[in-house]
Image: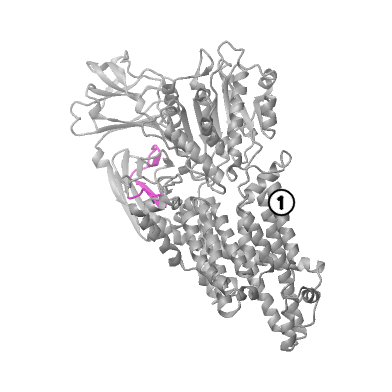
């Protein structure tokens, strides 16, 4: 039996490790280039009003500078455009150096005609992603900092009226929270760029304050969408390398028609095309360059300040973060283009395709594609070139003179920048006034490049492929062969629209002839979110692409696309199979934060199995056996499923709402990432199928975590044994009643004056000391009985089990009355208290963030305010102290409460599964209730 238990939990641990490996290390290495400072960075503190400095003693505002610029700004006489950087969770204000240094170099290249002043806020590196009590304070300090920054420019002829905000991680959420302040003027901020900021929901909801904060921000931006329509917000996600904040959480929830709110994953940003981890998104040179270029394009040269036009902000950000067409924002696109090239520079293409290599000599060259005879047969015109100069290169001729074009319109605005070349596709039916398409293949600088163009039939170049089922485990393969006679092929990956899906796509290219060709570019395109990813491959080659999604499609009516920018006259074989390790990685990416809930459920079920064994036989079973017996998934999932079914009924929903009961939490595998308070939850197939798997993974964490704790206690008892007198009594480590009362009062006072998590940690350590004493007693008894086994009379044994405190003291000091039953009693108590200690350790770990925050700010204040653990932690403190004296005998004497306890633990477990996945802090409430019931079972 024990071998089977260890084998099962070993297999579950293996699944967990495979998923963790794919989550943490299953992707390419970070290909970001590092940004370097050319001179030593300096951070000059900006003096704030005394009232602000006293109110926020742990925060600060700084101006970034280097070299001569730092000396020039020593007196804070500023003339640039203000940008304010906001660090995130445990972030340093010095992270602004990448943005500030690149902006300074850019300004020097422009001879300081326009430049930026980069400010940064020191939030004392607070853990605001785990402790939400400081988010409101940070928001209020940000408001004061913006006002202080604008005061620095008050003596300028044209002072700035707003500040651009760049927020990393939770800093981006704080930036949006500015608009929830009653006295905040929305005109002070017109542009916000966030980097890896979880806008949809917190990554971990370890206290109610962070959820209240998110709810307030979400409500403000939803109910006042019209008032905030002119505020431009760009959210950039880090991609799959960022396992701390998945990119689905970075999407902005906003009306579809609000084009000033934009979301993109960094893998889709032109000229970047790399994934970043949670920290490198701040210093990734490719992304920093895109951000700085956008900022300088947004500065009005006349005033030297950021533009106040929402249309220009949107145009510039679209250019640098989404398409990057060859035409700069603001360039005239509708003005007619006049040509004066000689006739010999023009050449009409009579075939369907053009393959042209520019010579090394400078020349003027134009190619003409006539459309009059091709409109009905072909739907699109596609062209690409590895000439990466950002100049117009595709035109539509509106006036011909012989074999040359005299006047045309510029069609280059449809150009997209790809990793290996630029490409443009135009729809022929939209060009009714155009007689010819013109490709400008001139090379005035004498540089060599390749131009490839063709007329296309969209229907013949789009193929549908059914992706394998997620549960095929890679055994089913979908194959398709593309005989490439064209430059662009699109594979519609049918039914690929859910985040739990993951595929390994193998693309094998083979060409009949060997010659220099442009590389192939493979693009996974997601129609409903800007999360495209690119891969470049030489021809011929074999490439493997792992395809996953950051967001699910809301109504499952659309699927992802695989675009193949292929080499002509080559064959491409595409094989698609499910990658089960990647599926596990996706499940952990989206549902990993809820594993503590499942671990807590398993621990409660384990204690229930032990108490049931105590009731039945008088002895608790071992932890391993208890976990194997308690893991009955049908008893957990069926009640939750029944509750969801009932909530679909209007009458039950009305009753539920009238009682003020919270909504049922669903696993975050849906398109809507926010925490819904609507009790009418929908039943979805995959979250209910994933839940048993998460329960097994949570059980593995609880099993092996308790094993590690047990080994730790075992070895720690060796080191502590010399400090204690040998004990042979099960009552060693217990407390007298008045000592328990004093301890309870002390813990309550300690938690009220300082931090509730500190009191919980002390109480957990006190209970762990009881476990250590039992462990030492068990080892002493085992050694004594092995060396000199003896038996005592029944009368002596009964005397040993007396409850007199004086006899307890004598036994604790080494009474000679020993028997096998005494050893069994000690082992029973050790099993029971070890389970209690494991559960207390879990509650302590869940409250650790507030303890860390309290310690981090101890020099500023002694009392944590607000304290997410206080006062509801008081019953837990009382229970943890009173449980120290609990043993199997006291449980058996209270059969009524023990029966009630056994009947209530299962509903508590079901309640945790229903109400805790998106509100993890509620786990402490449920565990506190369970421990209170245990105390009642011991004392009543």
The answer to which of 532 and 782 lies nearer the viewer is 782
> Within 10 Å of the Cα at label 1, are there few (<14), some (14-19), or many (20+) other Cα atoms?
some
Residue at the (69%, 63%) spot, across then down: 767
Residue at the (62%, 50%) spot, across then down: 869
Q: Secondary structure at mark 1?
A: helix
Relative vertical location of residue 693 with respect to residue 899 in this rendering, above or below: above
Residue situated furthest top in the rendering: 157
Expressed as whole percent of the image width and height from the top left, the position of residue 219 reads: 46, 37
Expressed as whole percent of the image width and height from the top left, the position of residue 686 reads: 39, 56
Q: Is residue 319 magenta?
A: no
Decide if residue 901 is on the left or right side of residue 501.
right
Q: Which residues are magenta?
A: 495-524
Relative vertical location of residue 741 with respect to residue 830 in this rendering, above or below: above
Where does label 1 land, which residue? 749
The answer to which of 879 and 576 lies nearer the viewer is 879
Q: Is residue 519 magenta?
A: yes
The answer to which of 852 and 574 lies nearer the viewer is 852
Q: Quadrant of the N terminus?
A: bottom right
Relative vertical location of residue 633 with respect to residue 414 in this rendering, above or below: below
Decide if residue 598 is on the left or right side of residue 337.
right
The answer to which of 671 and 471 lies nearer the viewer is 671
Expressed as whole percent of the image width and height from the top left, the position of residue 622 reads: 60, 73
Residue 34 visible in rendering: no
Expressed as whole percent of the image width and height from the top left, the position of residue 270 reads: 45, 33
Q: How is the image coloured?
A: one colour
Dividing the picture into quarters, in which one does residue 637 lie?
bottom left
């Amino acid at each position: 039996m024990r071998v089977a238990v260890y084998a099962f939990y070993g297999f579950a641990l293996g699944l967990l490790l495979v998923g963790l490996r794919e989550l943490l290390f299953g992707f390419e290495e970070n290909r970001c280039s590092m940004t370097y400072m050319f001179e030593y960075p300096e951070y000059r503190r900006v003096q704030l009003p005394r009232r602000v400095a006293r109110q926020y003693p742990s925060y600060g505002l700084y101006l970034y500078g280097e070299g001569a610029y730092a000396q020039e700004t020593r007196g804070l006489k500023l003339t640039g455009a203000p940008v304010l950087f906001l660090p995130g969770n445990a972030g340093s204000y010095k992270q602004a150096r990448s943005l500030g240094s690149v902006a300074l170099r850019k300004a020097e290249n422009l001879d300081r005609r326009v430049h930026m002043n980069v400010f940064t806020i020191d939030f004392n590196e607070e853990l605001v992603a785990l402790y939400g009590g400081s988010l409101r304070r940070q928001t209020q300090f940000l408001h004061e900092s913006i006002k202080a920054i604008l005061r620095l420019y008050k003596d300028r002829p044209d002072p700035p009226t707003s500040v651009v905000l760049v927020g990393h991680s939770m800093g981006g959420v704080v930036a949006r929270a500015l608009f929830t302040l009653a006295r905040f003027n929305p005109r002070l901020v017109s542009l916000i760029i966030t980097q890896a900021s979880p806008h949809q929901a917190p990554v971990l909801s370890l206290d109610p304050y962070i959820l209240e904060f998110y709810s307030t921000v979400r409500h403000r931006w939803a109910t006042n969408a019209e008032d905030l329509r002119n505020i431009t917000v760009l959210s950039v996600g880090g991609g799959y390398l960022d396992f701390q904040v998945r990119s689905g959480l970075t999407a902005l929830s906003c009306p579809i028609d609000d084009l000033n709110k934009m979301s993109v994953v960094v893998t889709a940003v032109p000229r970047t095309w790399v994934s970043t981890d949670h920290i490198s998104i701040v210093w990734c040179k490719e992304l920093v360059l895109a951000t700085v270029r956008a900022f300088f394009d947004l500065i009005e040269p006349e005033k030297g300040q950021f533009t106040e036009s929402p249309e220009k902000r949107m145009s510039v950000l679209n250019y640098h973060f989404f398409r990057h067409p060859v035409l700069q924002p603001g360039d005239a696109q509708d003005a007619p283009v006049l040509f004066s090239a000689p006739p010999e520079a023009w050449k009409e293409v009579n075939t369907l395709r053009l393959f042209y290599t520019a010579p090394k000599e400078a020349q003027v060259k134009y190619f003409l594609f006539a459309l009059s005879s091709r409109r009905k047969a072909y739907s699109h015109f596609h062209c690409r070139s590895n000439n990466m100069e950002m100049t117009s290169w595709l035109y539509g001729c509106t006036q011909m003179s012989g074999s040359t074009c005299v006047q045309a319109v510029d069609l280059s605005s449809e150009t997209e920048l790809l990793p290996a070349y630029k490409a443009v596709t135009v729809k022929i039916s939209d060009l009714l006034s155009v007689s010819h398409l013109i490709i400008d293949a001139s090379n005035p600088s004498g540089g060599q490049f390749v131009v490839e163009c063709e007329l296309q039939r969209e229907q013949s170049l789009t193929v549908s492929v059914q992706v394998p089922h997620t549960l095929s485990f890679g055994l089913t393969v979908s194959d398709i062969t593309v005989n490439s006679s064209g430059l662009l092929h699109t594979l519609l990956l049918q039914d690929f629209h859910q985040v739990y899906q993951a595929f390994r796509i193998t693309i094998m290219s083979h060409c009949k002839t060997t010659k220099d060709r442009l590389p192939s570019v493979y693009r996974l395109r997601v129609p409903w979110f800007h999360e495209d990813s690119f891969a470049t491959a030489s021809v011929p080659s074999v490439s493997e692409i792992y395809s996953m999604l950051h967001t699910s499609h809301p109504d499952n009516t659309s699927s992802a696309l695989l675009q193949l920018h292929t080499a002509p006259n080559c064959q491409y074989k595409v094989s698609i199979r499910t990658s089960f390790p990647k599926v596990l990685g996706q499940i952990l990416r989206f549902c990993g934060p809820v594993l503590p809930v499942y671990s807590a459920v398993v621990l409660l079920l384990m204690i229930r199995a032990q108490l049931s064994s105590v009731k039945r036989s008088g002895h608790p079973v071992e932890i391993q056996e208890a976990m194997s017996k308690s893991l009955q998934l049908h008893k957990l999932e069926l009640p939750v499923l029944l509750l969801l079914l009932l909530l679909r009924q209007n009458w039950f929903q009305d009753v539920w709402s009238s009682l003020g009961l919270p909504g049922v939490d669903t696993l975050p595998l849906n398109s809507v990432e926010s925490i819904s308070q609507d009790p009418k939850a929908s039943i979805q197939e995959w979250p209910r199928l994933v839940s048993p798997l998460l329960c097994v993974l949570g059980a593995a964490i609880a099993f092996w975590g308790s094993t590690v704790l047990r080994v730790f206690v075992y070895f720690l008892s060796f080191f502590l044994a010399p400090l204690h007198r040998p004990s042979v009594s099960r009552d060693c480590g217990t407390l007298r009643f008045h000592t328990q009362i004093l301890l309870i009062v002390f813990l309550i006072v300690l938690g009220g004056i300082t931090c509730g998590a500190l009191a919980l940690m002390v109480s957990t350590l006190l209970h762990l000391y009881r476990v250590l004493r039992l462990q030492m007693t068990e080892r002493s008894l085992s050694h004594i009985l092995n060396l000199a086994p003896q038996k005592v009379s029944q009368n002596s044994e009964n005397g040993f089990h007396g409850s007199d405190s004086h006899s307890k003291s004598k036994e604790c000091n080494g009474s000679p009355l020993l028997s096998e039953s005494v050893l069994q009693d000690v082992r029973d108590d050790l099993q029971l208290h070890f389970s209690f200690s494991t559960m207390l350790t879990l509650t302590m770990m869940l409250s650790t963030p507030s303890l860390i925050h309290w310690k981090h700010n101890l020099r500023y204040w002694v009392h944590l305010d607000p304290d997410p653990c206080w006062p509801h932690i008081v019953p837990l403190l009382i229970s943890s102290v009173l449980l120290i004296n609990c043993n199997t005998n006291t449980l058996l004497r209270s059969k009524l409460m023990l029966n009630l306890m056994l009947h209530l633990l299962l509903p508590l477990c079901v309640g945790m599964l229903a109400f805790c996945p998106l509100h993890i802090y509620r786990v402490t409430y449920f565990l506190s209730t369970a421990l209170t019931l245990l105390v009642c079972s011991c004392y009543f």
